[in-house]
């Protein structure tokens, strides 16, 4: 999947494409939040968590690479 395509795709569609490609929720969260600061990731979590059936705190917990 090209990064150029995802740059212009809305968040719901990007998540749907990722699920269609067989990505797990953890993989999707980490890919969406890769390279973002905590503040940017928190803003993203507010938008993406409901689409992934997660709470904001679950999204933030999953984004950490533990």
Image: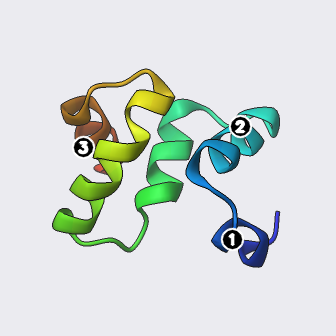
In this rendering, the label closer to the viewer, 2 or 3: 2
How much space separates mark 2 and mark 3, taking CA atoms?
A: 20 Å
Residue denoted by label 3: 60
Q: Position of residue 26 (x, y in %)?
A: 48, 37
Task: Tell me residue 34's x, y (percent).
Answer: 43, 65
Quadrant assignment for the N terminus: bottom right
59 over 52 or under it: above or below = below
Left or right: 27 with respect to 21? left
**Quadrant of the rendered structure where residue 21 is?**
top right
- Is residue 66 among what the camera can see? no
Check disc 1 and report the residue beneath it. 8
Contact (CB < 8 A) between labels 2 and 3?
no
Question: Above or below — where is 22 with respect to 30?
Answer: above
Q: Residue furthest bottom?
A: 4
- Residue found 55% across the figure and 44% down from its top: 28
- Left or right: residue 49 versus residue 6 is left
Asked whether disc 1 touches disc 3, contact meaning CB atoms under 8 Å apart, the reply is no
**Alpha-carbon neighbours of circle 2 within 10 Å: few (<14), some, or many (≥20)?**
some
Q: Residues within 10 Å of mark 1 (few under 14, many from 20)?
A: few
Distance of label 1 from label 2 (alpha carbons): 14 Å
Task: Tell which circle, 1 or 3, labels the residue nearer the N-terminal end.
Answer: 1
Picture coordinates of residue 24, whole percent (x, y):
60, 32
Q: In which quadrant of the rendered image does the C terminus lie?
A: top left
Cα–Cα gap, marks 1 and 3? 24 Å
Q: Name which residue lies at 44% across and 21% down.
A: 53
User: Disc 1 on helix, strand or loop?
Assistant: loop
Residue 16, numbered label: 2
């Amino acid at each position: 999947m090209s990064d150029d395509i995802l740059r212009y795709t809305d968040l719901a569609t990007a998540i749907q494409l990722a699920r269609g490609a067989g990505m797990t929720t953890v993989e999707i969260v980490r890919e969406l939040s890769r390279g973002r600061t905590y503040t940017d990731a928190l803003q993203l979590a507010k938008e993406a968590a409901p689409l992934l059936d997660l709470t904001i705190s679950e999204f933030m917990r999953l984004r950490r690479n533990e």
